[in-house]
Image (spheres, rainbow, N blue to C red):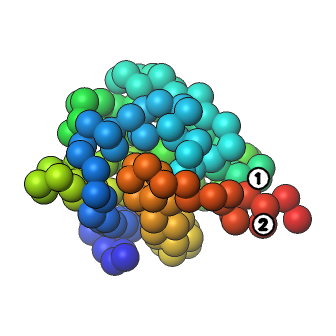
Amino acid sequence: MPIHKVKGEEIIQCEVKINARPETIFPFFIDPVKMLKWKGIKANLDPQPGGTYKVEVTPKHVALGKYVEVTPNSRVVFTWGWEGDGHPVPPGSTTVEITLHPQGSATLVRLKHTGLVKATSGQHDEGWVHFLERLSIAAEGRDPGPDPWVSRDTM
């Protein structure tokens, strides 16, 4: 997926076409149980403006931010960063925007992650590609299986 640079910041843009309607996909971004089907081992989500977005993605990586916008079946925006002292992307320091575009019986899911520092943009690009592939499987009603990144981080 391409990484773009605009006005001194790194921007990641990814998209995936999923064979499911927006109303099927949308809950995967706001419901902790559905979130854990494709990303994370623990989730604390309060999907309303100002509400908590906290996902323990792996045992060593906890994403933390706040929901900014939640438009059912259409758009979700939240701030993003990583817990832990000295992390170059602290909690809430970047923004993730997800939009859902119906295409017949499928949906084009577009993700835009802004505000990243150059040193971490490649890792975030790799991460979003990994997790959007897992989302595609889960939202289509299939099982993406255990996330290999979780077991990698326990070693």
Q: Quadrant of the C terminus?
A: bottom right
Mark 2: amino acid:
Arg
Q: Nearer the viewer, residue 101 or 92?
A: 101
SS at badge 1: loop
Which residue is disc 1 drawn over? 60
Can you name the residue that lies furthest to the left here? 104
Question: Which is in the foreground here, disc 1 or disc 2?
Answer: 2
Q: Quadrant of the N terminus?
A: bottom left
Q: Residue at 13% across / 56% down in the picture?
A: 103
**Residue 102 appears left or right of 114:** left
Q: Dividing the picture into quarters, in which one does residue 147 lie?
A: bottom right
- Work out how far the residue at label 1 is from the one at label 2, CA to CA, in angstroms: 10 Å
Q: Residue at 23% across / 45% down in the picture?
A: 21
Q: Nearer the viewer, residue 104 or 74?
A: 104
Q: Residues within 10 Å of mark 2 (few under 14, many from 20)?
A: few
Q: Is residue 63 visible from the viewing direction of this image?
A: no
1 and 2 marks in contact (CB < 8 Å):
no
Mark 1: amino acid:
Lys
**Residue 23 appears left or right of 66:** left
Q: Earlier in the sequence, mark 1 or mark 2?
A: 1
On screen, 9 above or below 111? below
The location of residue 105, given as percent across then percent down, is: 17, 52
Q: Is residue 48 visible from the viewing direction of this image?
A: yes
On screen, 91 above or below 15? above
Can you name the residue that lies furthest to the front here? 142
Q: Residues within 10 Å of mark 1 (few under 14, many from 20)?
A: few
Which residue is disc 2 drawn over? 152
The location of residue 73, given as percent across then percent down, is: 24, 36
The location of residue 128, given as percent across then percent down, is: 47, 63
Q: Dividing the picture into quarters, in which one does residue 88 lie?
A: bottom right
**Residue 11 appears left or right of 84:** left
